[in-house]
Image: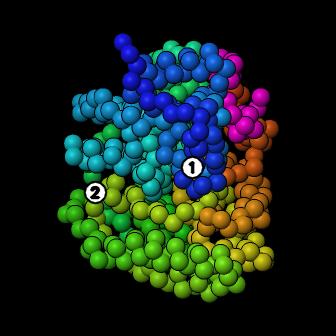
Amino acid sequence: MTSTTSTTSETTTWRNWAGNVTVRPRRIVSPASVDELAAAVRQAAEDGLTAKAVGTGHSFTAVAATDGLLIRPDRLTTVRAVDRAAGTVTVEAGLPLHRLNRLLDSAGLSLTNMGDIQQQTVAGATSTGTHGTGRDSASIAAQIKGLELVLADGSVLDCSAKRNPEVFASARVGLGALGVVSAITFGVEPSFLLTAREEPMPFDTVLSTFDQLVAENEHFEFYWFPHTDSCNTKRNNRSLGPAAPLHPVRGWLDDELLSNGVFQAVCALGKAVPSTIPAIAKVSSRALSARTYTDAAYKVFTSPRRVRFIEMEYAVPRAAATSALRELKTMVERSGLRISFPVEVRVAPADDITLSTASGRDTAYVAVHMYRGSRHQEYFTAVERIMTAHQGRPHWGKLHSRDAEYLARVYPRFGEFQALRDRLDPQRLFANDYLRRVLGE
């Protein structure tokens, strides 16, 4: 049978969403089946090329970079099975989350939790540990019930808690280091509504009641605006309904105008004239007023994000969150830094995935951003110094400077992942510079 794999010549340049990672691979392929994917992996090995799969490029790190074979999963988007009795859905790796969410909703089903954007492919999001916020419900990867993985020798491995459990334990957040994910089986549940309550709150109030806010709400998060004492809090909890979505005009005003259109202009102004940022921050922190609405879960969990930025995020033990945040605020106030993006804080329960940022411990996430093209090194370095002092674990898809020596200290099962990698990819077909830094040689 003649393969229908789409192949692109070596003249193509690939860039990630933020534009801070650029690669010129020798070949780009878009397989339309797991058999074509396996054949492409075998051919790369025969040709002495490394091989990496990329999704929509929403990682800020070079986790998917390669100068060898770049695998685009944009034709691996089939929904293979929906099993209502088992509460599972099996989809191919390249299906974007926004399409998965709509497909599930039309079938009366839903993921239990998700992040705040839905543009990533299912494999890209899970492989780097994408998460939302949840008191009891964890990351997208923690909702995986089974994986189909193409290994370095071109063989296809099915893994779950019962089949190849040692691979399943690691491959759910596999960084593309163990093989190429070709399909994922997620646990799903009947569709449900969430009521979102968003309101401003002083920084000290949020931190002094942080544990209570987390305990009393299924999904709690907040944004602190640097150079101010103001936060915007968001509490999402399940609702019996009826649905009461945002009025279209209010939704456009808050999500499109204030969070995207005007915010883009504000960030551009701050980049050109940094001295204006503290004053802008004070206005921005007061621009979003309190609001409450009820809608389908995926519509409440996710928001449009069209302002391009770069990001660093650290996962710290939940008990260390308020101390780390107070240190972060003090650092910004004492420095000459000018920060136009709010700091995002979320939580997750402990999970059992080897290299999940929440592996084995209840976690708080602290994410810092800078407008694309702005100087970020001084700010990110200062934040990283605070987070690592609290045994922080960096998000695998967001900027950081940590290496394998440090990561082995904060991940008790780090050696387990390394040993599995040695077994599944001894020739390092799936290696790149980023993985050599974070996983070792």
Question: Is residue 281 something one can see in this rendering?
Answer: yes
Q: Is residue 217 left or right of residue 386?
A: left
The residue under label 2 is 296
Which badge, 2 or 1, is on the more N-terminal residue?
Answer: 1
Q: Which residues are magenta?
A: 419-441
| Residue at 36%, 12% in the rendered image | 1
Residue 420 on the magenta segment: yes
Amino acid type, mark 2: Ala
Q: Quadrant of residue 49?
A: top right
Q: Quadrant of residue 248?
A: bottom left
Amino acid type, mark 1: Asn
- What is the spatial separation of the Cα atoms under label 2 and label 1, in whole angstroms? 30 Å
| Residue at 70%, 84% in the rendered image | 275
The kind of secondary structure element at disc 2 is strand
In the image, is residue 420 above or below residue 357?
Answer: above
| Residue at 75%, 38% in the rendered image | 437
Residue 424 on the magenta segment: yes
Residue at the outermost left position = 242
In the image, is residue 102 above or below residue 367?
Answer: above
Q: Position of residue 241 (x, y in %)?
A: 22, 62
Q: Position of residue 98 (x, y in %)?
A: 36, 49
The residue under label 1 is 16
The image's mark for residue 214 is none
How crowded pointer 2 is (Cα within 10 Å; few <14, some 14-19, many 20+) is rated as many
